[in-house]
């Protein structure tokens, strides 16, 4: 049995797969940081399918970007569980997982994920059932995002799109597909993670680091 879990943002998504079949799935968007309750949710999911942690054979997750606190807890939980059970961890980045919501759409997909009032995470992919990165992930300003969207002709996804205001009519915007879905991890070509060496993918400094450097 395989576990896929994503709790790096304000949404939480978890799925269990057995014999190539999804046997449990939950997706929810919460108003408050939630990742501290991740292990109880995993236990709940396993009990719902009459399983225990020892039945897991692999874990799938994301390395980031996302909320600093939630991302750290997400990785600490998944990596710690995998190490305790002696099973592998496979991972990708959060924006690529969101791009996977494009499904069977074939073409370029731009993902804009909320960072703060003035910035968004940016990712550009070519989707042919599986999204492939076209550019390096980065943090960009809203003005830069607007410029990229103005010159874009593909599909838009992500909660950062709402921050841009009016969207050009020639673009397809998947408004209700902006959250990372854990079960999509099962269908992506993921990297095997070295549990002892892996680091979160933050892409930017935390607010605390910015404040310290400004002193």
Image (tube, grey):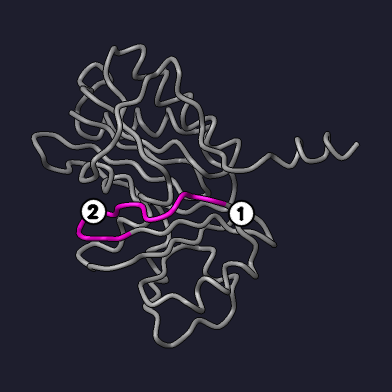
Question: Does residue 19 appear left or right of residue 47 in this picture?
Answer: left
The picture quadrant where one finds residue 99 is: bottom left
The residue positioned farthest toward the right in the image shown: 215
The magenta segment is: 126-138
Question: In the depicted view, which residue is nearer to us: 147 or 11?
Answer: 147
Give the number of the disc on residue 115. Answer: 1
Query: Image point 91% across, 36% down: which residue?
Result: 215
User: Looking at the picture, how far across and down is residue 113, in whole percent?
Assistant: 52, 57
Among numbered discs 1 and 2, the one appearing first in the sequence: 1
> Which residue is disc 2 drawn over?
130
Is label 2 in a helix, a strand or a loop? strand
Query: Image point 59% across, 74% down: which residue?
Result: 164
Query: Image point 30% across, 60% down: which residue?
Result: 126
- Main secondary structure type of the part rendered in magenta: strand
Question: In the depicted view, which residue is nearer to us: 68 or 134?
Answer: 134
User: Looking at the picture, how far across and down is residue 94, in whole percent?
Assistant: 43, 46
The picture quadrant where one finds residue 85 is: top left
- For label 1, the crowd category at 10 Å Cα-Cα, with few meaning under 14, some 14 to 19 and many 20 or more, is some
């Amino acid at each position: 049995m395989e576990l896929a879990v994503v709790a790096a943002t304000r949404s939480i998504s978890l799925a269990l797969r057995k014999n190539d079949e999804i046997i449990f799935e939950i997706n929810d968007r919460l108003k408050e940081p939630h990742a501290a309750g991740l292990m109880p949710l995993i236990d709940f999911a396993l009990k719902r399918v009459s399983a225990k942690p020892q039945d897991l054979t692999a874990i799938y997750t994301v390395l980031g970007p996302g909320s600093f606190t939630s991302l750290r807890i997400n990785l600490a939980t998944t990596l710690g569980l995998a190490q305790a059970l002696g099973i592998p961890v496979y991972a990708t980045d959060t924006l690529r997982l969101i791009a996977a919501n494009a499904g069977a759409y074939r073409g370029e997909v731009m993902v804009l994920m909320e960072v703060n009032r003035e910035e968004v995470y940016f990712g550009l992919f070519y989707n042919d059932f599986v999204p492939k990165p076209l550019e390096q992930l980065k943090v960009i300003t809203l003005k830069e995002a607007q410029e990229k969207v103005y010159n874009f002709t593909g599909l838009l996804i992500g909660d950062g799109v709402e921050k841009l205001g009016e969207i050009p009519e020639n673009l397809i915007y998947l408004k209700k597909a902006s959250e990372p879905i854990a079960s999509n991890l099962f269908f992506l070509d993921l990297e095997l993670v070295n549990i002892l060496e892996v680091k979160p993918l933050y892409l930017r400094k935390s607010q605390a680091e910015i404040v310290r450097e400004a002193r």
